[in-house]
Amino acid sequence: MKSDIAAYLVSVPNVWNSCLRVLKARGYHLSIECNVPPDADLITKHSQVTWFAEKNGIQLVAPNPTELLGLAGVVEHQEHSSTEPYWWVVDGDNLLEELYSSIGIGLEQHAKRT
C-alpha cells in the first residue's frame, strides 16, 4: 500500500452491517436466502447465502452485502430507467484490462483463471 494513505477499508464480514445500513438508508428493501439444510455448519450456511436489495422495480443480487452496495452504486450512477439490454454498462476506457495489464495479466489469462 502507498504510505500516503491514512485509512483503508477492506471487504470483510465486519463491514457488511454498515453496507446494509447504507442500502437501507438509500431506500432499498433488503432480504436474504439460504438454500442449505438447517443442520449445516455455520461456514456452509454463510457461504450459501444470497443477498437481495430491491428498489423501484430493480432487484440486485450478490453473494455479500459489500458487492450488493457496489451494484447499487452502478444503478445509481446510471440513473436506471430503462429495460434496454446492458443498461448497466458505463461507457469509457477498459479499466479492467488496464489494471490487469499493470500486473502482467491479460484478460485472456484472467478468463482462464476463473
Image (cartoon, rainbow, N blue to C red):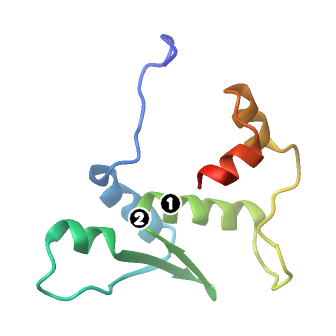
Specify the farthest residue to the front: 112
* Amino acid at dot 1: Glu
Q: Is residue 106 left or right of residue 5?
A: right
How many neighbours does mark 2 have within 10 angstroms: few (below 14), some (14-19), or many (20 or more)? Answer: many
Cβ atoms under marks 2 and 1 closer than 8 Å = yes
Total numbered circles: 2
* Amino acid at dot 2: Asn
Compared to 57, does 97 lie above or below?
A: above
Q: Position of residue 56 (x, y in %)?
A: 63, 85
For label 2, the SS is loop
Return the residue at label 2. Answer: 64
Compared to 112, does 44 lie above or below?
A: below
| Residue 79, quarter of picture | bottom right
How many neighbours does mark 1 have within 10 angstroms: few (below 14), some (14-19), or many (20 or more)? Answer: some
Q: Position of residue 13 (x, y in %)?
A: 30, 54
Residue at position x 75%, y 31% in the image: 101
Compared to 42, does 73 lie above or below?
A: above
Residue at position x 88%, y 54% in the image: 91
Residue at position x 41%, y 47% in the image: 11
Return the residue at label 1. Answer: 67
For label 1, the SS is helix
Quadrant where the C terminus lies?
Answer: bottom right
| Residue 46, quarter of picture | bottom left
Q: Position of residue 9 (x, y in %)?
A: 41, 37
Compared to 69, does 5 lie above or below?
A: above
Q: Is residue 52 left or right of residue 75?
A: left
Front-most of 6 and 12? Answer: 12
